Amino acid sequence: MLRLTLLAGTAAALVSQPAFAQTSNLAPAADAAQAAPGSEQHEESQEIIVTGNYVRELSLLSGASVLTGTELLRDVRPQLGDTLARQAGVSSTSFSPGASRPVLRGFQGERIRVLTDGIGSIDVSNTSADHAVTIDPLTAERIEVLHGPAVLLFGSQAIGGAVNVLDRRIPRALPENGAHVDVIGAYGSAADERSIGAGADVAVGEGLVLHLDGTWRKTDDLRAGGYVLSPAIRAEQLEIAAEEAEEGHLDEAAEATENANRRGRIPNSGTEQKTLAGGFALIRDGGSLGVSVSWFDSDYGVPTAPGAGHHHHEGEEGGEEAEEAEHGEEAVTIGLEQVRADLRAQVNVGGSFLDQIRVRLGAADYKHTEFEGDEVGTVFNTQGMEGRFELVQADRNGWRGASGAQFFQRDFEAIGAEAFVPANETSQFGLFTLQEFKLGGIELEAAGRYEHTKVRSNVVDVDRSFDAFSAAFGAAYAPSEAFRFGVNLSRAERAPAAEELLSNGPHVATQAFEIGDPTLAKEKSWGLEAYVRAQAGPLRLRASVYANWFDDYIFQTATGEEQDELPVFQYFQRDARYFGFEAEASADLFKAGDFTIRADAVADYVRATVDAGGPVPRIPPLRLLGGLEAGSDTLTARAEVEWVDDQDRVAELETPTDGFTLVNASLAWRPWSARETTLILSANNIFDVDARRHASFTKEFVPLAGRDIRVSARVSF
């Protein structure tokens, strides 16, 4: 709790400073556009408005998707990855219903930063696919998916992009009429999902706003559309059944047959999640100061492959020889808890050069326990703290920017027979700047970052330090307000993470023996992107083509070997290249008064290759999504079809994934257009098809949800 105490002390020191002030740019995120993709409010052909703790109007961001309002309520799921999976260029790890992280342009893990209000989630979700993100989408008011030079503001781990989640836990503005209350609830049939959340902001004095929120969600085992196991694993189980029957092992044969023929519910996939948070903000004429404290608790099952099991050695007292203990198909569950404190402060200087000073701090104590049946397998303890200090420049004849410093520190310890990562400490310090220039129709953006990272583990006598330098440049030309095209060039360096350096042992939740490499070098990359934003009457278009060339690319792949009766997954380093595109288009087919019929489409594709190693593992295939929407200010109906291609371009020892087509429909009713109250009835995967994400480690035995009828509601007053 040391870091939480330190953060509280920092808050007290800042409170003692002169009174702060509310300014026009502290409007709540709910005031932002709340339309679905393709609508005029959502379209970003002119200027992208983001609300993170950095320059708020990044007009040159090459790609920024914003999920808010009705669209966010319709798509919200227990985990952040599944919530964002319909956005352009986004897929999901879909490890289980309780653990799903975003995949951006084929990148995941250490190449994606998941943020809450510009600060990392301070958990271990980036270290392994089975670890949940400690952000409940029910509390989100706005989620931003960011690309382009400006992501260097968040760290070298944002090579693939960043996801920034905004909530009201530290209020940004005084609530109208002195108070604001939101209540959100949902029911989903595929997992018998029940969820409810509520939040309130109350003004209690001159510029002082108090906030309180809480959420609860519970799901049963998820129902799949068709067989639980993939065709390849079903065939394998049937072959095992035949062999066991031939040898007279009838019980084993019956078990394998049952596994092969299992349909419907995915065993051990239920979840229960709870959060509670309180905060306050002092908002005055000179700036603002706010603090929040939150609690996140999640228990979720980790489905395992049929026949999964391994041995490990348990030492005995007196130096006697270790004996083998076999672990069979015991149910693996994860229980995690995080206590977190956050601070945000802003001083409005209002000078001719310096406009604002911003401070953002976050600290968390995190505990994560992996259970094997009723027994404690491995416990992960993490204490972390991250902070940012920013100087925001005033706009001077088209020149503006922000510069600052950022630090991060994490103490990690794993306890248990399967502690596959030794205790270690990671510290990081960075300096960054982002500068924007506008010269008539030409817009320029430049960003630079220096980062010093230190990873140390006394347990295995590893002490590594890295100095990383990254830079990006963007140029855009806008001959009119309706058309803009541009190009971005970046050079980025990333230090290897502790898990990539130090892993060496069995990991029961992923059913893998993971091996790192303590000699890994920095990962370096060149990035190039060209994009266009256009609007012509009722037609709107956003499209990007991008490529990344990596030196010393760090990746994990199966070696084909076994250790401890588990497949070995090892980290390697080679050159690699990525190429891809993403596009969004929409058109108003008919418009009369406030009634509009609109068609929209999304397409994305990534191709990634490791030199002398073939395809990069777990790259999402080509995807097309088309929708038709009709409605007014109060009632909107939508139908959409999502087609995902087969992925047969796979790494060695990786299996292909069949494509699928999902048909979804929804009806949204907003009874009071001046308020945020919304009721949504939706049907997802209407035809109950078997669908699996190629980016998932568990795709062979954890398919996506089958037919899911959902009722969602948000009531605001």
Image (cartoon, rainbow, N blue to C red):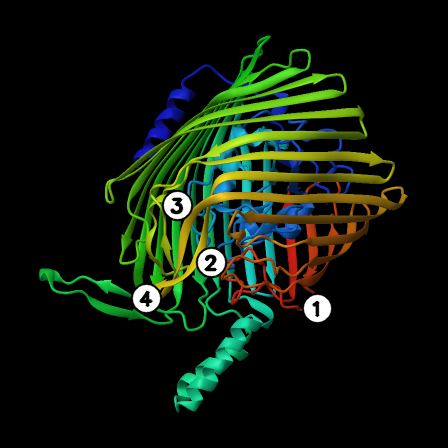
Which comes before the other along the chain, label 3 or label 4? Answer: 4
Q: Which residue is mark 4?
A: 374
Q: In the picture provided, is 248 more to the left or to the right than 544?
A: left
Q: Which residue is mark 3?
A: 500
Q: Does residue 528 appear in the picture of this structure?
A: yes
Q: Is residue 345 above or below residue 351?
A: below
Label 3 crowding class (10 Å Cα cut-off): few <14, some 14-19, many 20+? many
Res. 454 image quadrant? top left
Cα separation between marks 1 and 2: 28 Å
Q: Secondary structure at mark 3?
A: helix
Q: Is residue 555 above or below residue 327?
A: above
Q: Residue at x 73, y 42 (%)?
A: 35
Res. 542 image quadrant? top right
Percent position (x, y) of residue 98?
A: 49, 57
Q: Which residue is mark 2?
A: 272
Q: In the picture provided, is 244 more to the left or to the right than 416?
A: right
